[in-house]
Amino acid sequence: MIVIGTRESRHVLDLFQRYSRLTGKAVYHWEPERGLKRVGVDHIPIPKTERGCDALDYIRSSKHFGVYVMDQFAPELQTEPNQQRLRAIATGGGAQTVVVLDSEPFLPESLDGLVIQVRHARSQPRLRQGRWVME
């Protein structure tokens, strides 16, 4: 499981879409009340995945590789049943990777050791001493 703290979730999702296009690997996107959709095939929603708990159950039952980008999912991480679902996905040995995107991600202690946490921010080039540098 990966938790990405970002204020630019659209940009991060675009990067995952590029990954999917270049590799042919399945990437899914979840939004509250909209459910899961496969990136690149947004017009076909996955039924009964609008609620976070239902989306996690779907992910856990999947037998296929998939990256599941969960947008604005931090509130869902606060419930113990969803934490249990995520633990089951993370330790189940399956080929699913859950990626949580949120501007201020909440990471419960019960998921310590199962999560990689990353902070995303696009840097802007700056001119320093006559050279363009990324900060």
Image (cartoon, rainbow, N blue to C red):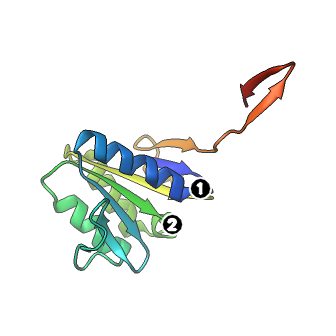
Disc 2 crowd, CA 10 A, few/some/many (<14, 14-19, 20+):
some
Quarter of the image with the C terminus in it? top right
Distance between the Cα atoms at labels 2 and 1? 11 Å
Secondary element type, mark 2: loop
Q: Which residue lies furthest to the front in this view?
A: 130
Would residue 64 appear left or right of 29 to someone viewing this image?
A: left
Quadrant of residue 93 in the image?
Answer: top left
Q: Indicate the position of residue 60 as horizontal and vertical percent values.
A: 22, 59
Residue at the (21%, 45%) spot, across then down: 95
Q: Can residue 102 be seen in this view?
A: yes
Would residue 109 appear left or right of 122 to someone viewing this image?
A: left
Residue at the (36%, 77%) spot, across then down: 51
Q: What residue type is labelled 2?
A: Gln
Residue at image mark 2: 72
Q: Which of marks 2 and 1 is in front?
A: 1
Would residue 122 appear left or right of 20 to someone viewing this image?
A: right
Residue 57 or 88: which is nearer the viewer?
Answer: 57
Q: Indicate the position of residue 15 as horizontal and vertical percent values.
A: 44, 46
Q: Indicate the position of residue 24 as horizontal and vertical percent values.
A: 22, 44
Residue 65 or 53: which is nearer the viewer?
Answer: 65
Secondary element type, mark 1: loop
Figure check: 127 above or below 35: above
Residue at the (52%, 69%) spot, across then down: 75
Residue at image mark 1: 8
Q: Residue 66 carries which label?
A: none
Residue at the (54%, 42%) spot, across then down: 118
Residue 15 or 59: which is nearer the viewer?
Answer: 15
Residue 2 or 14: which is nearer the viewer?
Answer: 14
Q: What residue type is labelled 1?
A: Glu
Would residue 23 appear left or right of 31 to someone viewing this image?
A: left
